[in-house]
Image: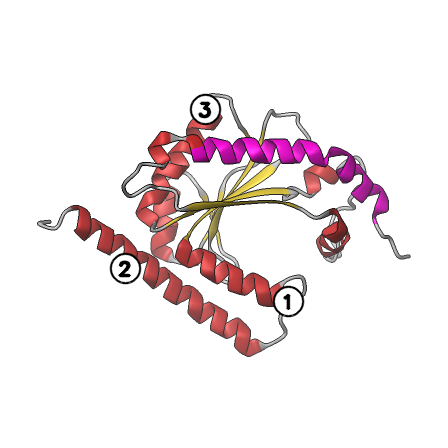
Amino acid sequence: MHNDFSDLIEMYRKQIHLFKQFKNVIVDCFVLEPSLNTTTNPTIHSIKARLKDPDHLAEKIARKLSDPDAEPITTDNFFSRITDLSGVRVLHLYQDQFPKIHEFIDRKIREGDWYLAETPKAYSWDPEAREFFEKLGLEVKLKESHYTSIHYLIKPKPDSIVCCEIQVRTLFEEIWGEIDHTINYPSPSQSRACKEQLRVLSKLVSTGTRLADSIFRVHSDPQG
């Protein structure tokens, strides 16, 4: 029987202000952190933030339930099952900048300002990147699409219904993500050629990121 999920959507509408408040707090924390926003060579290039549109939420729930083994989504577990209602994306130029961003997030958690809803994940297909992220204590996952990004699920307190997904990625990875999103959302592309081209593009993105790292290493130590 068709379900428009109106009860779940209405529940989100009533609480959306809380998600917006916490999203704004997280953005401000990144924007106002001096160590990440130096005048020369800032660690953060730019920040994007968004809330899930209630009008598009039914599609999200339906996709979540498309797996025949998926647990039902109810008013009791809705906020724990749908964890990307609020999102902040932190973009940086090259991978060597990431440890500073990770340390900032880790410090906010250690000091009790933020709480992890689950173990942070680094999505990457690249073996060298896997080693890099694992040394920082991140759980590395492989997606068939070759999607690359680091995800943190953050709460303002452990028992809060509010959760914000922080994504951290390079500008190269952001370009890939925007192209993938355009052709695969809300419905995945059925073109085998597109899927293969996206995999090729992900390898070019990885190459670009490594080259950017090399450029900045030489720039900082030209005699090295």
Give the labeled residue for mark 3. 110
Say which quadrant the N terminus sits in: bottom right
Give the labeled residue for mark 1. 188
Compared with residue 94, is residue 162 higher up or lower down, i.e. above or below? Answer: above
Q: Separation of disc 2 and disc 3 at Cα?
A: 33 Å
Q: Residue furthest top?
A: 111
* Numbered disc 1: secondary structure: loop
Q: Residue at x 37, y 43 (%)?
A: 98
Residue 9, by quadrant, is top right
Give the labeled residue for mark 2. 211
| CB within 8 Å, label 2 to label 3 | no
Q: Separation of disc 1 and disc 2 at Cα?
A: 31 Å
Question: Of discs 2 and 3, which sits in the foreground?
Answer: 2
* Residue 210, x across and y down, in percent: 30, 57
* Dot 2 amino acid type: Leu
Task: Classify residue 14 as left or right of residue 101.
Answer: right
Residue 12, by quadrant, is top right
